[in-house]
Amino acid sequence: MLEIYCRTDQSCICICMLCLVDEHKNHDTVSAAAERKEKQRHFEETQRKILKMIQQREKDLQELRKAVRSHKSSAQTAVEDSERIFTEVQRIFTELIHSIERRRYEVTQMIRDQEKAAVNQAEERLE
């Protein structure tokens, strides 16, 4: 009895030489050990390819995480810069408003003083 693998039927069979010649006459047959070795080689090759793909995906994932961290950091910096600029602009406008209000008060006071002086001068001339 021979233990062979029939690739045509994709099965391992124990068969005598007579049946091999008769039942599996035009089939692709090899020894079970040879088929096992071939399948093991194919499995290992597939396993290597899958491991390589996994490693590449892990590397890609690390790069993506790094890019996300970088973008988050950039976004945070942009937000902080924007808030700092807004605060500074707000401070400048507040100072400007106060300056304008002071100047308006000074001008109003000056006009009133001039008006008072003019009225006093006019009253002195009338007397």
Image (cartoon, rainbow, N blue to C red):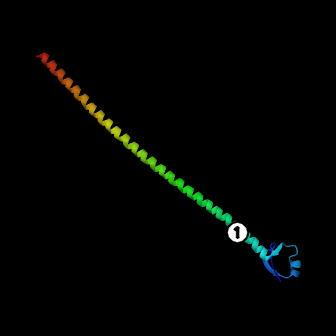
Circle 1 is placed at which residue position? 44
Figure quadrant of the C terminus: top left
Looking at the image, residue 58 lies above or below residue 11: above
Write the residue at 28% across / 31% down: 103
Q: Residue at the bottom extreme?
A: 1
Residue 33 rendering spot, x and y as whole percentages: 77, 76
Residue 67 rendering spot, x and y as whole percentages: 54, 53
Of the pair 26 and 48, the residue shown nearer to us = 48
Write the residue at 87% across / 81% down: 17
Residue 30 rendering spot, x and y as whole percentages: 82, 74
Q: Quadrant of residue 48?
A: bottom right
Amino acid type shown at disc 1: Glu
Of the pair 109 and 41, the residue shown nearer to us = 41
Mark 1, other Cα within 10 Å: few <14 / some 14–19 / many ≥20: few
Q: Quadrant of residue 86?
A: top left
**In screen coordinates, is 88 left or right of 51?**
left
Write the residue at 62% across / 63% down: 54
* Dot 1: element: helix
Residue 100 rendering spot, x and y as whole percentages: 30, 33
